[in-house]
Structures are given as structure tokens and as C-alpha cells.
Image: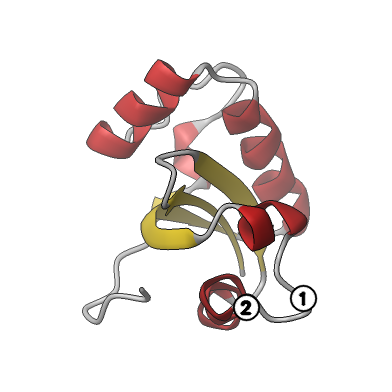
Amino acid sequence: MYYTYMLRCEDNSIYTGIASDLERRMKEHFEKSKKCAKYTLRHTAKKLECAWQTENRALASKLEYAIKQLAKPQKEELIKRHELKSVEGIEEKNYVLYKKEKPLD
């Protein structure tokens, strides 16, 4: 399984990435480990806003790219609604909204 996720940073910016192990990746971002993204090293990650699970890396990367093409207001709307139908080129049926009982942040 792969995940495409959106993080809120302390400066209110949004970081989008992919991971095969979401919990490990969140730990890297929040603890600013050597493996965290350069972006979250400078813009401290504050909260996992949402994540989608999919079966392979190609689909996760496709969604990541599509989200990164969105303007900030569109990203905010995506976070609010968690619906991928408005993301151009993405078939919503290939993705499942990730929900976990215990927050990752």
C-alpha cells in the first residue's frame, strides 16, 4: 500500500507527499529527522490534514502530482471535503481516504 498525504505546516502552508509507511513518514516530518523533506525542515509540520491509500506507487505519485498542481484555495477545499472528484485526471475509485482512530500528529 502507498499513501498520498497533505500536511499543514506552522506557517499555514501545505506540503503534499507520498509514503509506503505513513506512520514512519509522519514521524520523520514531525521530528525533523535526517529523512524528512527539505520543505518540512524549513516549514515545521504541524498536522496531518488528510491522506489517501492506494495500491501502488504509480497511483500515489499521480495523485501527489495532481494535488501539487492545485492552487492553495483548491487544496484547502480538498482538505475540507476529502473528495478527489474535483482533482483533474484522478479516478476517485482508485483511492481510499485514510482514517485512523489515533491521530498521527
As measured in the structure, the alpha-carbon distance from the residue carrying label 1 to the one carrying label 2 is: 6 Å
Local packing at callout 1 (Cα closer than 10 Å; few below 14, some 14-19, many 20+) is: few
Is any part of residue 99 visible from this angle? yes
Residue 85 versus residue 16 in the image, above or below = above
Q: Looking at the rendering, which quadrant does residue 48 occupy?
A: bottom left
**Viewer-nearest residue: 2 or 70:** 70
Residue occupying the point 51% across, 74% down:
30
Residue that numbered label 1 is attached to: 35
Residue that numbered label 2 is attached to: 28
Q: Residue 43 appears at what percent x and percent y? A: 57, 52
Q: Residue 7 appears at what percent x and percent y? A: 47, 53
- Left or right side of 103 for 67: right
- Left or right side of 18 for 82: left
Amino acid tagged 1? Lys
Secondary element under disc 2, as helix, strand or loop, is helix
Amino acid tagged 2? Glu
The answer to which of marks 1 and 2 sits earlier in the sequence is: 2
Q: Residue 69 appears at what percent x and percent y? A: 64, 21
Q: Residue 27 appears at what percent x and percent y? A: 54, 81
Q: Are marks 1 and 2 in contact (CB under 8 Å)?
A: yes
